Amino acid sequence: MSAVSPAVDTGSPVAPVDPVRAWLAARPALTRAQKYDRLAFTFCKMGTVGLIAWLVTPPIFVFAVALVAIGLYGKAVALGITRSQCILRRPLLIMGFWAAVAAADATWLLLF
């Protein structure tokens, strides 16, 4: 004969589980390379917005963001990242794109 104890109602409400907090706790920790990739992707998005709004933003903004994105992606590559969240996917390709943007922007700033 097995003894089954009935559930005891203590009267205290059970706190609901926050699904966002549970999801964050279940995620694996990011590596240093992934952290740099995430930060570089943020600058990539900022630069893209700057390119789209080139007519209303100062060109120096795009130049500065391109240089920061190149530096951050360079650090991520040095730490071992091989794939990015950016639409171009390959960090070296992304760095090349932003280098071309920086060169075109520097030419624009110096000549015009």
Image: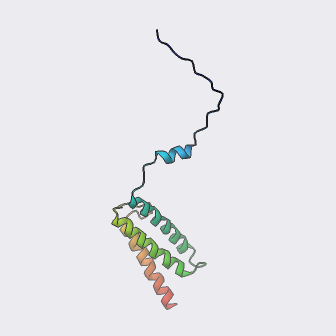
x, y (%) of residue 103? 43, 82
Who is closer to the viewer here, 73 or 87? 73
x, y (%) of residue 32? 39, 60
Q: Is residue 37 left or right of residue 62?
A: left
The outermost residue toward the top is 1
Residue at 57 percent across and 18 percent down: it is: 6
* Residue 71, placed above or below residue 90: below
Q: Is residue 108 left or right of residue 91?
A: right
Q: How many marks?
A: 0
Who is closer to the viewer here, 53 or 35? 35
Q: Is residue 30 left or right of residue 78?
A: right
Quadrant of res 76 = bottom left
x, y (%) of residue 49? 55, 70
Q: Which colour scheme is used?
A: rainbow
Residue at 34 percent across and 67 percent down: it is: 78
* Residue 92, placed above or below residue 60: above
Who is closer to the viewer here, 65 or 18? 18
Residue at 54 percent across and 17 percent down: it is: 5
Residue at 49 percent across and 86 percent down: it is: 108
The outermost residue toward the bottom is 111
x, y (%) of residue 1? 46, 8
Quadrant of res 19 = top right
Who is closer to the viewer here, 68 or 90? 68
